[in-house]
Image: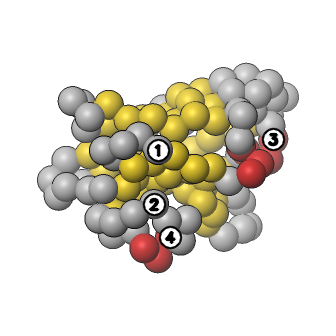
Amino acid sequence: QLAASGGGMVQPGGSLRLSCSASGDTHDTMAWFRQAPGKGREFVASINWRSGSANYIASVKGRFTISRDNAKNTLYLQMSQMKTDDTGVYYCAARRGLISTDMADYDSWGQGTQVTVSS
């Protein structure tokens, strides 16, 4: 089971940190996806749970950082220099296997947390 938290409203240029606590099945890769109003769900970032290696969608590189705390079994997404285009519902996801940007590869999903970037 995955439980996401930390969403909220922030002004452009601001920061937020999302958290996702994991329990139950083991996983090799965890990721964040987001869904903007009226659009499909898109990949944001993923991380290999053991090595910590990560990848990002181009639009968030240099602004977002995905990380994990193995001891707490928690995934994070630190978001900074936020833009209005970052608005959406953010979902954490987990899978057994290598890093993937395809949402169909992920077995477990959190409930989503709303992020709104607005002045």
Instruction: Tell me the CA gap for discs 4 and 1.
Output: 19 Å
Instruction: Tell me the CA gap for discs 2 and 1.
Output: 9 Å
Crowd class of label 2 (few under 14; some 14 to 19; many from 20; radius 10 Å): many
Residue 117 position (above or below residue 27): above
Residue wearing tag 2: 99
Labelled pair 4, 3 in contact (Cβ < 8 Å): no
Q: Residue at x 41, y 40 (%)?
A: 52
Dot 1: element: loop
* Residue 85 appearing in the image: yes
Q: Amino acid at mark 3?
A: Thr
The spot of residue 11 in percent (x, y) is 77, 26
Residue 103 position (above or below residue 33): below
Mark number displayed over residue 84: 3
Residue wearing tag 4: 103
Image quarter of the N terminus: bottom left
Sequence-earlier tag: 4 or 1: 1
Instruction: Tell me the CA gap for discs 4 and 3.
Output: 23 Å
